Amino acid sequence: MATITLNSVGATVRSPWVGFALRRAWRLVVSLAALVTAAFAMIHLIPGDPVRSSLGTAADPALIAARRHSLGLDQPLLKQYGDFVGHLFQGRLGDSIGAQMPVSEIISSRLPATLQIAVPAFVLILLLAIPVGMTAAVLTKDGRRRRGELAFTGVTGFLGAVPEFLLAVGLIAAFAVAWPVFPVASQGGPDSYVLPVLALTVVPAATLSRIVRVETLRVLGEDYMRTARAKRLPARLRYLRHALPNLLTSSLTLGGLLFSSLLAGTVLVENVFAWPGLGTSIVQAITEKDYPLVQGVVLVYGAAALLITFAVDVAVAVADPQSTVRGS
């Protein structure tokens, strides 16, 4: 009985899943620590006094000293760093210089608006890019429909190169000014979500569809696809049961990167549409030199990107454990 227990423990220790989880968790912890350190250093690397820059050169020196004391900027550097990390574990991100309220409250009130356009855009990207890319690959494989291939690569290449803020301005000009179907800006009814979500969707969807097409062409040339054709399986089963699952690894990886970039892309799109999210907040904070708020938003964006990357690594490992878990 004891031998069985020891063998079980040894097998668990030698399990590639345990090693994979420990490596990914360690990378996440190190990356988060680097992010926290960089965010803390940001306010100290800015030339001059951030409080004086925020309040203005004509501000009362007593007010500046009181604000520096409230922010803890008059303490030794190591103590400031320790307090900063300790406050993070308590969910405290400091106080905004301009709004004079906790940064965590500002972020918690603004983050839902950002996610309300970022999440639908991400879902729409996957729903558009994967079917379009797979269909283009199936129709143009083996050099068929050369004109269709050129049209697909030309259109997606053009759309993928358009900056998101320029696309947002074009959507406003077309569908809010010239043809007033949707509101120009601000968050309102369901129709106010259409243009911001489209502005976030078009460019990544075009880029991802090109990559999906290339990956689908690679999968269609594999031996198991030739075997499926030799068995005279219906096309629907070949593509959905054999081709699509083998696209999951690359699609999940790219999807995670796209969602991380979407969070950053919302900064420009939100400002074009006057959307009350984190993107508008960080631009306003930079303009007003409200460095604690900038610091907090950067932390949220950075932590979100790292957590998304970690989740994608886990999802890819579940989808393709042989190449990911054993090869990492």
Image (tube, helix red, strand yellow):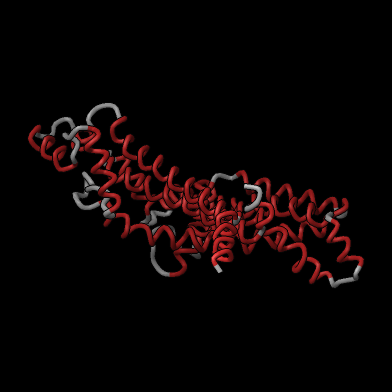
Vertical comparison of 123 with 302: above or below: below
Residue 168 visible, this orientation: no
Residue drawn at x 28%, y 55% is 91
| Residue 230 x/y as whole percent | 92, 66
Specify the quadrant of the image occupied by residue 212. Answer: bottom right
Instruction: Judge by depth and name the residue closer to the eye, 322 or 81.
Output: 322
Figure label count: 0
Residue 187, x across and y down, in percent: 39, 62
- Front position in the image: 276 or 50: 50
Residue 95 visible, this orientation: yes
The outermost residue toward the top is: 47
Residue at position x 42%, y 49% in the image: 303
Q: Position of residue 54 (x, y in %)?
A: 22, 37
Q: Nearer the viewer, residue 205 or 88?
A: 88
Residue 41 found in image quarter: top left
**For the view shown, which residue lies furthest in the left direction?**
62
The percent position of residue 52, horizontal first and vertical second, equals 19, 33
- 178 sits left or right of 150 in the view: left
**Quarter that holds the N terminus:** bottom right
232 is higher (above) or lower (below) than 319: below
User: On the picture, is 284 further left or further right than 34?
Assistant: left
Residue at (44% x, 64% y) in the render: 192
Residue 93, above or below 246 = above
